[in-house]
Image (cartoon, grey):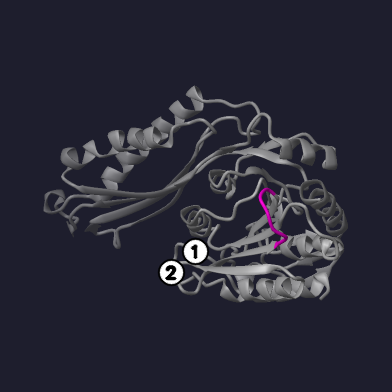
Amino acid sequence: MQLISMLQQLVASNSISSINPSLDQGNREVIELLANWLNELGFATEVMPLADPRKANLIATLGTGPGGLVLAGHTDTVPCDEKLWSNNPFQLTEKDKHLYGLGTCDMKGFFPLAIEAVKPFLEQPLKQPLIILATADEESSMMGARTLVEAGKPKARYALIGEPTGMKPISMHKGIMVEKLVIEGRSGHSSDPFLGVNAMETLHQVMGELLSIRDKLKSDYHNPQFAVDYPTMNLGCIHGGNNPNRICGQCELGFEIRPLPGMDMAKLQQMINERIFPLEEKNGVTISLNHYDVPAYSAAPDSKLAKICESLTNHPCEAVSFATEAPYLEQLGMDVMVLGPGNVEQAHQPDEYLALDRIQPTVDFLTQLIGRCCL
């Protein structure tokens, strides 16, 4: 099957993952497409179900033995607003030497390129196995990667994650802590402040504490390898109250922090808790804080895969601020790099695209990488 035809089918399958249940979709159709294609090429395929029966990972292996190379990517996409797209986001559209469609860049487009790169090796025995790994829910909960760690597989010496990096090797990225804060006060008639407890007023104080923490993090932590060389905090969304003449009984705030490699995320969470939860008793409210986090990643200083990728691309390793599945594959014992076609600037945007002139250089790079790691 031709590369473009594969990408058409992958884009056409809605595999949006979201923390919003009304938007969240499964990825099984994408996994079945990839499994069928790789089966036809001689791969041994394992579909790994997640707790949500609509979702699964795929581990497809060519060859046997220890060591080897994993080419990894996620099969889900972020949600999209179809009204903001020039074309149907679920229909691959070629225009102005670009391939438009949801996931073309981030990161369904990586799989047809990886499959194309495999083809020269199908008739020769590999000394080390080649594994194509496809995961679920990278864009929402990282549950696919977490499930791999729990299962203790796949095992290999090297892993390349094909996230959009402009074909530059990435050996370091920030982590992410996503926080959902809920404040429960007591509603009442606004004519008398004593008839209720205003949750929004407590939220105002909470935001002051958070901005103070943000300033401290910016002052105390730096890493010059990042373009934004300090930990960031973003106050992303806020909801509360329902009428101007009613005391606000509940408020919610969603925010995130992106720590640098080496920062202790448990201590950072403790700092937030210590600054926020005393406001419960002080203001007579109830505060809950739910979160999930993705660790920061930094490849080992002596990473062999980093040296291979630098030599094949003629680019030194760089650092990025977005998070990936790299720390989870590292927990499985692999030397991990992040490198793929497309640019992060095109990801998570209307009219997401993969430039046609990125396709052949990516296939050539992957072919050489497989030769270095598996022959």
**142 left or right of 71 in image:** left
Identify which amino acid the numbered label 2 is placed on.
Pro
Packing grade of label 1 (10 A; few <14, some 14-19, many >=20) is some
> What SS does tag 1 mark?
loop
Q: Is residue 198 above or below residue 5?
A: above
Which residue of the protein is positioned furthest toward the left in this rendering?
194
User: Would you say the magenta stretch is mainly helix, strand or loop?
Assistant: loop
Q: Residue at (12%, 54%) from the top-left corner?
A: 195
> In the shown orientation, is residue 174 left or right of residue 287?
right
The residue at which mark 2 appears reads as: 21
Whether pointer 2 and pointer 1 mark residues with C-beta atoms closer than 8 Å, the reply is: yes
Q: Could you tell whether 17 is left or right of 158 in the image?
A: left
The image shows residue 149, relative to residue 309, as above or below, that is below
Crowding at mark 2 (Cα within 10 Å: few <14, some 14-19, many 20+): few
Q: Nearer the viewer, residue 374 or 271?
A: 374
Q: Which residue is mark 1?
A: 18
Closer to the camera, 83 or 34? 34
Q: In the structure shown, which secondary structural element does the residue marked by tag 2 occupy?
A: loop
Over which residues does the magenta segment extend?
62-67
Above or below 222: residue 161: below
Residue at image location 84% in from the left, 54% down from the top: 367
Q: Position of residue 143 (x, y in %)?
A: 48, 58
Q: Residue 24 at x, y = what percent?
A: 49, 69
Question: Distance between the Cα atoms at labels 2 and 1?
Answer: 7 Å
